[in-house]
């Protein structure tokens, strides 16, 4: 049983979206930049993508979980801490250590990655509109937990080198938490969270196979 009603949950998004405007526009521009850098890979671009993911996770942890969601659910204090930790993971692995390499690829995993990226950025809010929610009540790309998590797994499926397991532990845990809550709260656009979380196993299998063959990852 959740400690808040669906009406309270939706009201938090309405207050949050109104309170942070126009940050949503900036995160779309950031997301577009990250996609372009995947298509035109470089060492500097990899670091920008890592920093972009770190920024999205940090913002969501502090601004959404701590400043807004915690007003109706004290567990958000812990959720926010995990999101901030995940931000630090991306800063360490992607920026400081340069261990996240992205690039265009072919094959089923790459297509799944692009599908998750497109879903998080475009289809997710459109589904919300189709279900009758006004823009202000929709969890937006880059600044709310579920779209950020789906987008993250999409990008990790587009990596061209093995990914440390520590990079996707927290996103996987959130895919279970958020995906389960989606059924209780009646948010069908979040159901894909559970599928995106399964990407962790696909990435791990891909990387293990790649190491066994002694080749770079080509999803």
Image (spheres, rainbow, N blue to C red):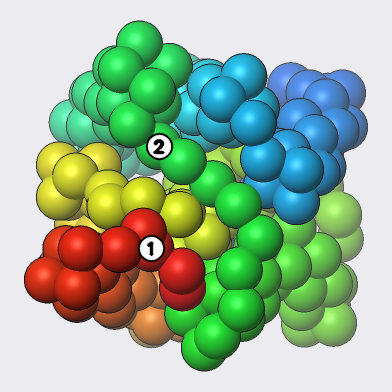
Q: Is residue 72 left or right of residue 137?
A: left
Residue 185 drawn above or below residue 71:
below
| Residue at the spot 35% in from the left edge and 11% down from the top edge | 96
Q: Residue at x 20, y 63 (%)?
A: 214
In the picture as drawn, the residue positioned furthest to the top comes out as 96
Q: How many marks?
A: 2
Which corner quadrant of the image does residue 143 belong to? top right
> From the viewer's perspective, is 97 left or right of 11?
left
Dot 1 crowding, Cα within 10 Å, few <14, some 14–19, many 20+? many
Coordinates of residue 174 in the picture (x, y in percent)? 28, 55
Is residue 32 visible in this depiction of the protein?
A: yes
Q: Quadrant of residue 187?
A: bottom right
Q: Residue, x 83% and y 26% (percent of image)?
A: 26
User: Residue tagged by mark 1?
Assistant: 217
The earlier-in-sequence mark between 1 and 2 is 2
Q: Position of residue 70 (x, y in %)?
A: 35, 30
Outermost residue toward the bottom? Answer: 108
Q: Secondary structure at mark 1?
A: loop
Residue placed most toward the observer, 144 or 16: 144
Residue 186 position (above or below residue 38): below
Left or right side of 6 for 86:
left
Q: Secondary structure at mark 2?
A: loop
Question: Residue 4 at what x, y percent from top left?
Answer: 35, 54
Question: CA–CA distance between discs 1 and 2?
Answer: 12 Å
Q: Nearer the viewer, residue 75 or 41?
A: 41
Residue tagged 2: 100
Which residue is nearer to you in this view: 167 or 37? 37
- Per the rendering, the mark at residue 80 is none
Tell me, yes or no, if residue 185 can be seen here: no
The quadrant the N terminus occupies is: bottom left
Q: Going 86% across and 60% down the picture, which residue do you hit? A: 134
Binning the other alpha carbons within 10 Å of mark 2 as few (below 14), some (14 to 19) or many (20 upward) gives many
């Amino acid at each position: 049983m959740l400690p808040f009603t669906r009406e309270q949950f939706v009201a938090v998004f309405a207050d949050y979206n109104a309170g942070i405007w126009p940050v949503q526009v900036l995160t779309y521009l950031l997301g577009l930049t990250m996609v372009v850098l995947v298509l035109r890979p470089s060492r500097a671009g990899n670091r920008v993508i890592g920093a972009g993911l770190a920024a999205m996770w940090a913002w969501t942890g502090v601004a959404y979980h701590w400043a807004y969601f915690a007003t109706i659910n004290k567990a958000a204090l812990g959720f926010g801490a995990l999101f901030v930790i995940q931000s630090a993971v991306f800063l360490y692995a992607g920026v400081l250590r340069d261990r996240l390499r992205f690039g265009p690829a072919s094959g089923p995993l790459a297509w799944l990655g692009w599908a998750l990226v497109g879903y998080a950025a475009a289809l997710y809010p459109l589904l919300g509109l189709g279900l009758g929610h006004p823009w202000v009540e929709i969890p937006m790309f880059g600044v709310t937990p579920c779209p950020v998590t789906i987008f993250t797994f999409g990008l990790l499926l587009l990596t061209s080198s093995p990914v440390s397991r520590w990079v996707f532990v927290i996103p996987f845990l959130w895919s279970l938490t958020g995906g389960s809550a989606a059924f209780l709260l009646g948010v069908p656009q979040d159901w894909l969270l559970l599928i995106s979380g399964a990407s962790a196993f696909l990435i791990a299998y891909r990387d293990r196979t790649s190491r066994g063959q002694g080749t770079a990852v080509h999803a």
